[in-house]
Image: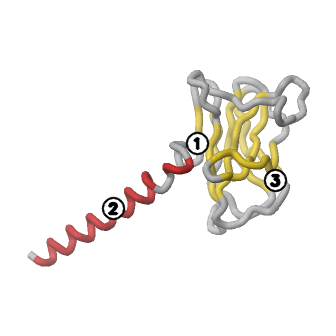
């Protein structure tokens, strides 16, 4: 009987840890899928954990208009300083999008990858190029972590 009780207690502990890690700890950074994907009907971005580097690689982006993937620092759960942007991406799907970052990233950091529309000049200009938004006026973005054990 004590073995069954021990197994039940261990199960409850493991389930509690899983719940805290996957549901409670991410709340302060928004409800973006922690697997690195964000999308609406016409646009999407997918980015996995990244190794420390001065480059980020988005697995893919789907754009309804020409635009950019822009990397922002995490400023207490909000978009912080812009650290880099991709080249101009065409309408449709782009795979393995390289995004240069102006500084080395460090293990444990969290960044935001935000999709921006091009204003028509083919040059990313903060304040002129604006973030893509869903039909509900939400900015299309995702967050990703820097992890020394990441595959990329």
Q: Between 82 and 53, which is closer to the camera in this rendering?
A: 82
Looking at the rendered structure, the secondary structure element under dot 2 is: helix
Q: Which mark is residue 15?
A: none
Residue 67 image offset from top left, x and y in percent:
78, 31
- Give the residue at x 74% y 47%: 71
The quadrant in which the N terminus is found is bottom left
Determine whether 151 is above or below 40 in the image. Answer: below
Looking at the rendered structure, the secondary structure element under dot 1 is: strand
129 with respect to 28 (left or right)? right
Query: Can you see residue 87?
Result: yes
- C-alpha span from label 2 to label 1: 25 Å
Residue 76 image offset from top left, x and y in percent:
63, 53
Q: Which mark is residue 16?
A: 2
According to the image, label 1 marks what residue? 37
According to the image, label 3 marks what residue? 101
Q: Between 43 and 81, which is closer to the camera in this rendering?
A: 81
- C-alpha span from label 1 to label 3: 20 Å
| Residue at the farthest left position | 1
Q: Between 151 and 36, which is closer to the camera in this rendering?
A: 36
Looking at the rendered structure, the secondary structure element under dot 3 is: loop
Q: Residues within 10 Å of mark 3 (few under 14, many from 20)?
A: some
**Residue 152's image quarter?**
bottom right
Determine whether 80 is above or below 64 in the image. Answer: below
- Give the residue at x 79% y 47%: 82
Tag 3 or tag 1, which sits nearer the N-term? 1
């Amino acid at each position: 009987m004590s073995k069954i009780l021990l197994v039940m207690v261990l199960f409850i502990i493991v389930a509690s840890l899983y719940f805290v890690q996957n549901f409670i700890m991410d709340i302060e950074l928004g409800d973006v899928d922690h697997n690195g994907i964000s999308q609406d009907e016409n646009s999407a971005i997918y980015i996995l954990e990244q190794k420390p580097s001065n480059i980020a690689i988005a697995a893919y982006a789907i754009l309804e208009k020409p635009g950019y993937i822009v990397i922002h620092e995490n400023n207490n759960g909000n978009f912080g300083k812009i650290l880099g942007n991709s080249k101009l991406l065409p309408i449709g799907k782009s795979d393995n999008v390289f995004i240069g970052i102006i500084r080395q990233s460090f293990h444990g950091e969290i960044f935001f990858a935000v999709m921006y529309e091009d204003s028509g000049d083919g040059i990313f200009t903060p304040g002129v190029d604006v973030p893509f938004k869903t039909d509900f006026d939400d900015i299309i973005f995702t967050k990703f972590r820097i992890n020394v054990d990441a595959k990329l």
